[in-house]
Amino acid sequence: MVSNNLIPDHDAGVFNPPVRHPVGIGDQFMDVLFGGFSHWDSAHFLYIADNGYTIQKHFAFFPLFPTTVKTVSETVLFPLRFFMNGHSALLVTAVAVNVLFFVAAAFVLFRLSIMTLHDRQLALRTALLFCINPAGIFMSAAYSESLFAFVSFYGMLAMERKQYLPATLLFALSSTTRSNGIVNCGFVVFFTAKELMSKLRLPLTEFSLQDVLFIVLKLISTVCYISAILAPFVAFQYHAYHLYCGDFKREKALVLWHPLFPTDNEEYLPPGSTTIPPWCNWTVPSAYSYIQDSFWDVGFLRYYQLKQIPNFILAAPMIALCGFAVYSYCRVNWSLCRTLGLGAERKEDDEKPRTGFNSPQVFVYIAHLSFLLLFGVTNMHIQVVTRFLASSSPVIYWFAAHLTRDDPQHSKTNPAASENTVYPTNPVLQQIHNWKSARRTTQAVLGYFLFYNVVGVALHSNFFNWT
């Protein structure tokens, strides 16, 4: 609120359509309070929640978050409309919904960390670090990051509990929220493969008809689970195809189409237009792929230009943290990584850590992060990598908790590090309080999280480019 009202907005030349609803005192008050949460992609999500998908470029934004905001605004928070217009009510609803999803994501991450790391204190530190993560502003603004983190982490927790059906439903919700939700199919494949490998290692003399049936049924169910996770993505593309390539009536879309949108710009093409988009003629039509390629210039190594060096610097801390996490884990667990986490345990593995960041259970999450990191640095707008990874992978917070965990030897040689305990139940706040006595590594990680969290709030709310 302070940043949005004291710092003049930067003219970024991005999507920011004027509100079509009458503006009253309540709307002006809400703009003072929450206006900073409505910038950048928030403007797209709020427009979709208000008007639906009436222009072509909006098919880059998946429907679960704007649908949730619209539904809550028209039901639970309907009384807000007595004091403000529809757009302001949607903005307040989006912020409220994201706060709830963020808190829920922190709790689910805590439970997932306990099951995976087998260390309650490290799990607590993980959840606390998530609360001050470098992409914090996007967890509160009208973005889909909090919702995506919640359904993804919850799906991972269900997989750890071997609850395949709930996990599939949650991962399907993640692919209805963001396109990278389809990557969560990998968790179903990995956990299934682990179960099958335990059967396939049996000697042939011990192999029974029941084992064969188990394998066949497991493979069939896995195909069904993967199909269910991919279904929302495919359905969304089909919906776009129906609107732009089928016989959808243009008049239906123009009712909600903004009169100030340019009529000669392909980005703002309404459904049912006489102009047929090029992607309609593709062998596999995909509005999402076409929009990312043509309107946002997203593609392999396209962002590797000299003028983008500042954005690479902006994303460098997250890339370095994730890269170091992958390297550190693989260095300790190379035999596990070499067999893709599916090999039989050997005697020397008994000496490996069974708890904490380097535990064997973390492998699948390392593989997941590795794929997202590689894709992010080669195919995406590089500054987006920070929020892209911060809302997708628990490894970031596990590794940060691992790095910042108090070292008993350090406490012995630095008595100031263990005295003056002001926050006995919050180790992260305690380290911030005793900043000068903290280790350099701890200072670097916490400094990065706090700096990006605070500065991101100030810059994002004024249309300055930030992650």
Image (cartoon, rainbow, N blue to C red):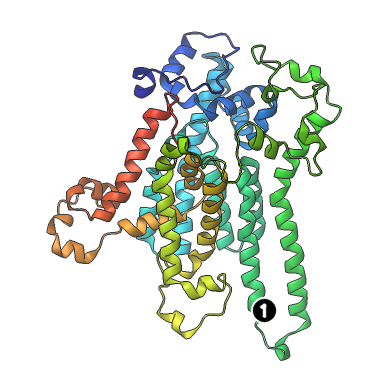
Residue lying at 72% horizontally and 23% vertically, measured from the top left: 269
Crowding around mark 1 (Cα neighbors within 10 Å: few <14, some 14 to 19, many 20+) is some
| Amino acid tagged 1 | Lys
Residue lying at 73% horizontally and 47% vertically, measured from the top left: 231
Which of 339 and 157 lies nearest the eye of the viewer?
339
Which of 108 and 134 lies nearest the eye of the viewer?
134
Which of 73 and 186 lies nearest the eye of the viewer?
186
Q: From the image, which quarter does the C terminus lie in?
A: top left
* Coordinates of residue 300 in the picture (x, y in percent): 60, 46
Whether residue 20 is situated above or below residue 386 in the rendered picture: above
Whether residue 100 is situated above or below residue 346 in the rendered picture: above
* Coordinates of residue 425 in the picture (x, y in percent): 29, 52
Residue at numbered disc 1: 199
* Coordinates of residue 401 in the picture (x, y in percent): 36, 56
**Is 165 situated left or right of 403 in this image?**
right
Q: Residue furthest bottom?
A: 205
**Is 228 situated left or right of 247 in this image?**
left
**Is 129 situated left or right of 219 in this image?**
left
Whether residue 29 is situated above or below residue 348 in the rendered picture: above
- Total numbered badges shown on the rendered structure: 1
Q: Residue 50: in sight, yes or no?
A: yes
* Coordinates of residue 95 in the picture (x, y in percent): 49, 30
Q: Residue 426: in sight, yes or no?
A: no
Whether residue 179 is situated above or below residue 82 in the rendered picture: below
Q: Residue furthest right?
A: 247
